[in-house]
Amino acid sequence: MAFIDYYKVLGIPKTASENDIKKAYRKLARKYHPDLNPDNAEAEKKFKDINEANEVLSDPENRKKYDQYGEHWQHAEEYEKARQQEQYHRQHQSDGGRYSEEGFSEFFEHMFGGSSRGAGGRQVRFRGQDFNATLQLDLKDVFATHKRTLTVNDKNIRITIPAGVENGQVIKIKGHGGKGINGGPNGDLYIQFSIENHSKFKRDKSDLYVTVDLDIYKALLGGDITVDTFNGKVKLSVKPETQNGTKVKLKGKGFPKYKKEGQFGDLIITYNIKLPTKLSEKEKVLIQQLQTLRA
């Protein structure tokens, strides 16, 4: 896989702060988002590169490795271990040969490219780079399990998105990362879900919350009303003398539970009693009469 300069991708200097990285990412992600650039392969690739750059540079530990090792940052630990071993062997050489930067450069090349021969001529194998991607969805998109095709590193991958996936949740697609070096295993693909909620329902895991307006007459006298759930309507019976802020739980009318087929959370309804406005003179008289009766 060709080396990608993540700083250039985000259009920021190497001295950029965490806040600078976040601002640059958000600006570019909006500009090249697939929803705003349908059937635009170039925009789709840029969007992928932008997400990949953000995944690395927004993590302080990964950014430190990237700044030090560049395209080989994923193998930083192996590199350090091998470098220490090489220094140890050189220090214990009987001929007292001097260690040179040129020699170390060659060793580094052997580790991550070239012949990559270890002790006894054995070829050193390295696991491929892990890929990171962000998949943006709407809340309605994860109400039911469905399949979707993603393009990662110019390859189409068909994945199943389980119902009930959480915002920020990460799933691993094994073996769909970078190709292994010298016959080593492929890396993995990590997909983080960014789920936007444009509905009137507030989600907390598998439970949903919603506020329903109730007129004063229905609250006082009771009666039937029809309310929206996430995937349809249901009829409810309101008890007489229902107070403002009363909560009603509808079992199993919430959101699907992740990887628990057929199981749903609850829908919690909060009643908001609306008082009438622009009263007529006759209405005012009747309310005053009611006030007298109550007194």
Image: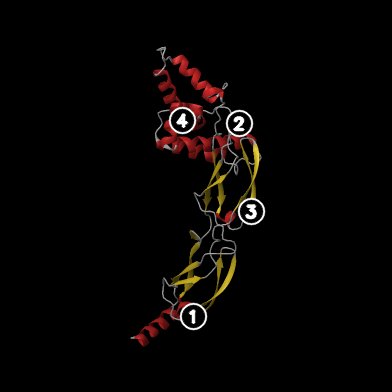
Q: Which residue is mark 3?
A: 146
Image coords of residue 27 (percent x, y): 49, 38
Tell me the quarter of the picture where residue 149 sits: top right
Q: Say what secondary structure mark 3 lies in.
A: strand
Image coords of residue 266 (percent x, y): 51, 66
Q: Which residue is mark 2?
A: 183
Q: Is residue 6 left or right of residue 155?
A: left
The amino acid type, in three-letter code, at marker 4 is Ala
Q: CA distance from mark 1 to mark 4?
A: 68 Å
- Is residue 208 visible to us here? yes
Q: Is residue 42 left or right of residue 104?
A: right
Neighbour class for label 4 at 10 Å: few (<14), some, many (≥20)?
Answer: some
Q: Earlier in the sequence, mark 3 or mark 1?
A: 3
The label on residue 222 is: 1
Pointers 2 and 1 in contact (CB under 8 A)? no
Q: CA distance from mark 3 to mark 2?
A: 34 Å
Q: CA distance from mark 2 to mark 1?
A: 72 Å
Q: Which residue is mark 4?
A: 76
Q: Is residue 35 left or right of residue 240?
A: right
Q: CA distance from mark 4 to mark 2?
A: 19 Å
Identify the residue at horizontal 60%, vertical 66% (top origin): 232
- Above or below, 130 against 135 in this view is above
Q: Say what secondary structure mark 2 lies in.
A: loop
The amino acid type, in three-letter code, at marker 2 is Gly
